[in-house]
Image (cartoon, grey):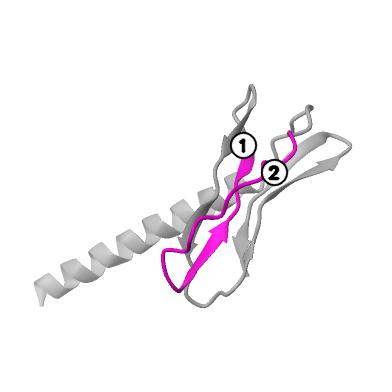
């Protein structure tokens, strides 16, 4: 009985930590980082053969390092359970400059 209570309290504490971490990560991703210089034109990539069923190609993109744009190559990823479409990330522009919108599953 005592071990069950310890396990329950441990799981409860772990859940609280995970929930707090998710809240912090969510708050950080909503802050835009603006870049004054437009990103370079996208590279043309050769899409390799799929490693198997249930994979989707995530195209490459330019990432801002704080000083320059760096190319992040495309890759195959496993489709997340419950989703079927990958919406690619992209650079958008408004009056403040260029900012990155993360790709996500739909």
Circles 1 and 2 in contact, beta carbons < 8 Å: yes
Specify whether 85 is left or right of 25. right
Report the residue at 47% width, 64% height from top.
50
SS label for mark 2:
strand
40 in relation to 101, above or below: above
Residue 63 badge: 1
Q: Mark 2 points at which residue?
A: 100
Residue drawn at point x = 73 percent, y = 33 percent: 40
Label 1 environment density (alpha carbons within 10 Å; few <14, some 14–19, many ≥20): some
For marks 1 and 2, the one nearer the N-term is: 1
Relative to 78, say whether 37 is above or below.
above
Instruction: Describe the element under mark 1 as helix, strand or loop.
Output: strand
Q: Is 83 on the left-hand or right-hand side of 50?
A: right
The quadrant of the image that shows the N terminus is bottom left
Residue located at (71% from left, 49% from top): 90
Tell me if 67 is positioned left or right of 93 in this view: left
What segment is highlighted magenta in the picture? Answer: 40-63
Q: Which of 51 and 93 is in front in this view?
A: 51
């Amino acid at each position: 009985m005592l071990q069950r209570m310890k396990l329950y309290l441990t799981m409860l504490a772990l859940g609280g930590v995970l929930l707090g971490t998710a809240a912090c990560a969510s708050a950080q991703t909503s802050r835009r980082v603006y870049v004054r210089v437009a990103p370079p034109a996208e590279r043309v990539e050769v899409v390799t053969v799929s490693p198997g069923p249930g994979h989707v190609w995530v195209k490459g993109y330019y990432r801002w390092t704080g000083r320059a744009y760096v190319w992040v190559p495309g890759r195959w990823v496993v489709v997340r359970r419950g989703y079927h479409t990958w919406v690619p990330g992209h650079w958008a522009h408004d009056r403040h400059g260029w900012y990155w919108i993360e790709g996500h599953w739909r």
